[in-house]
Image: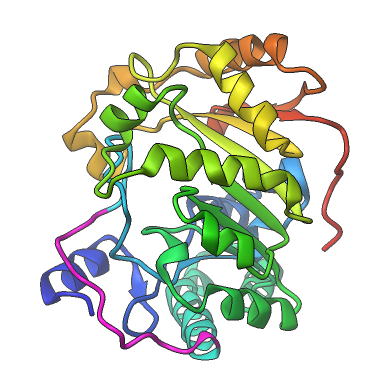
Amino acid sequence: MISKELKEELMRQQYRLAGNHSAVKVCHWTKESLVNDRQCYKQQFYGINSHRCLQMTPAVAWCQQRCLFCWRTYKDTTPDQKWDAPDEIIEKSIEAQRELLQGYYGFDKVNKAKLDEAMNPNQVAISLAGEPTLYPHLSQLIDAFNERKFTTFLVTNGLAPKVLSELSLPTQLYISLSAPTESVHKKLNVPMIPGTWKALNDSLELMPSLDTRKVIRITLVKGWNDINPELYAKLISKAQPDFVEVKSYMFVGDSRKRMTIENMPYHEDTKAFAEQIEQRLEGYKIVDEKKASRVVLLSNGKKGMIKS
């Protein structure tokens, strides 16, 4: 299902394939937790353990958009019907994670107790690359992770509202919102199919009915979408998430072919824009921030930390 060229490129970028169409890559913050005892903002904000997080995707090569700020690698590949079973994906993903982490036993600075725990992850971020809702057995995958006592974080672009309406819900659901208007959406997200702005809005309207922890993620790109905070507030009000993350675009990966470092906001820029949204968004307050990740968290106060 994935071309030889793309497989080789993913391997060079330290991905590991987990079957025919899934992949794993050790998160920067998993490494930081093991080596330098520094945690990612998801641990600070929500309580998951950075070192026990499995960052994976069940659809590494496919997405309905070509977002200019995306750091992932995409090629012109077309999925066929040879979809792997959820349990197979999980087993191979954990195996790939262990393979990628094994070498850390040779580093003196590594916390060996944490590394032992990392070999048995209990948190999965279904978000690494591609659009996970394109995997037709996503509900069964989430169910299978839940049966293994994982907390499950799913990140989607929101372009499949029907899938979301029928989905077995993860512990925490993210919908990415990176444009305040349809015109910005088309220029920045570069949709490959028609009707994406309507589909995204349909997903936002669906969000209040989904009985799980919900997050709107705004990736802020300087000079592109750092405008109209009142329109972001209107869209967020429609979705009624528990949390809103306003996060700086990072000048990494393939995005460097399309963006410049000037498009990456400083943390102060991101916080200032989050404050503008806060002023226009009833019921939400800025409750936390992590400067190293250039991210600010707003909350409506209805959900607290996850007890893992």
How is the model colour-coded? rainbow
Count the numbered circles shown: 0
Question: Residue 91, percent across and down?
Answer: 53, 88
| Nearer to the camera, 302 or 149 | 302
Query: Which quadrant: the C terminus?
Result: bottom right
Q: Is residue 266 left or right of residue 54?
A: left
**Magenta stretch bounds:** 73-86
Question: Residue 244, percent across and down?
Answer: 66, 33
Q: Is residue 56 left or right of residue 186?
A: right
Whether residue 289 appears in magenta in the rendering, the answer is no
Position of 68 relative to 164 (above/below): above
| Nearer to the camera, 158 or 216 | 158
Position of 227 relative to 137 (above/below): above
Instruction: Determine if residue 109 is in view.
Output: no
Q: Residue at x 78, y 23 (%)?
A: 284
Question: Residue 302, percent across and down?
Answer: 88, 39
Q: Residue at x 65, y 56 (%)?
A: 50
Whether residue 80 appears in magenta in the rendering, the answer is yes
Q: Quadrant of residue 68?
A: top left
Q: Main secondary structure of the magenta part?
A: loop
Position of 46 relative to 14 (above/below): above
Q: Is residue 306 left or right of residue 34?
A: right
Instruction: Determine if residue 171 is in view.
Output: yes
Q: Is residue 219 left or right of residue 242?
A: left
Question: Residue 191, percent across and down?
Answer: 28, 43
Position of 197 relative to 42 (above/below): above
Q: Residue at x 59, y 27 (%)?
A: 235
